[in-house]
Image (cartoon, rainbow, N blue to C red):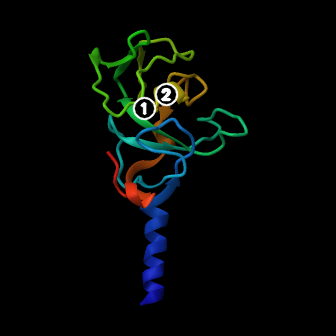
């Protein structure tokens, strides 16, 4: 029974769920450094508002010694949608509609090198960190394909926070 239970746990955490550790400040106040979350890609289709963990590899990377691991960001737009940002007012627009973003720590004032408006290509997503002025994300050509993240590199959607215990619970 014990061996079967251990085998089941190994299979579930290998193919259905994974544990990820938050690194950096780009998702404050939603997530903090060293928090542990469970992610899944089981039958996952990216949706606006999802918090996802994205791999960094040859097609989706910003190479520095500190940035080798996966990144965690929020999906702002999916394929076919158009994103525009008013950096003076700090407002993000998707398909001409201003987003209501109560999860952001700061307005979106930091501008990298992507010129807006941009259309999200097929099989890609546009992602931003919740701590907008401390996040390297889809506003920069150093992330993904000129700022756009290929859906194939999404490791999973954040579904549950397991540590610290005082913040234990679902992810929204």
Could you tell me which quadrant the C terminus lies in? top left
Nearest the eye: 80 or 27: 27
Left or right: 97 with respect to 46? left
How many marks can you see? 2
Residue position marked by numbered label 1 in the rendering: 125
Above or below 124: residue 83: above
Residue 101 at x, y = what percent?
A: 31, 28
Q: Residue furthest top?
A: 88
Above or below 54: residue 18: below
Compute the Cα span from label 2 to label 1: 6 Å
Could you tell me which quadrant the N terminus lies in? bottom left
Contact between marks 2 and 1 (CB within 8 A): the answer is yes
Q: Residue furthest bottom?
A: 1
Residue position marked by numbered label 2 in the rendering: 148
- Secondary element at image label 1: strand
* Residue depicted at 38% across the width and 54% down the height: 167
Residue 66 at x, y = what percent?
A: 68, 40
Left or right: 63 with respect to 19? right
Above or below 153: residue 123: above
Please identify the quarter of the rendering in which residue 51 is found: top left
Categorize mark 2 by other alpha carbons within 10 Å: few (<14), some (14-19), many (20+): many
Residue 28 at x, y = what percent?
A: 46, 38
């Amino acid at each position: 029974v014990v061996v079967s239970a251990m085998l089941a746990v190994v299979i579930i955490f290998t193919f259905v769920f994974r544990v990820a550790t938050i690194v950096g400040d780009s998702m404050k106040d939603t997530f903090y450094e060293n928090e542990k979350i469970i992610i899944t890609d089981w039958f996952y289709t990216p949706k606006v508002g999802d918090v996802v963990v994205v791999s960094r590899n040859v097609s989706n990377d910003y190479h520095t010694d500190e940035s080798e691991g996966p990144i965690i960001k929020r999906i702002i737009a999916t394929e076919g949608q158009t994103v525009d940002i008013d950096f003076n007012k700090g407002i993000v627009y998707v398909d001409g509609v201003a987003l209501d973003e109560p999860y952001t720590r700061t307005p979106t004032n930091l501008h990298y090198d992507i010129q807006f408006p941009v259309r999200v290509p097929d099989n890609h997503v546009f992602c931003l960190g919740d701590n907008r002025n401390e996040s390297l994300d889809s506003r920069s050509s150093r992330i993904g394909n000129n700022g756009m993240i290929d859906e194939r590199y999404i490791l999973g959607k954040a579904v549950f926070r397991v540590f610290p215990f005082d913040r234990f619970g679902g992810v929204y």
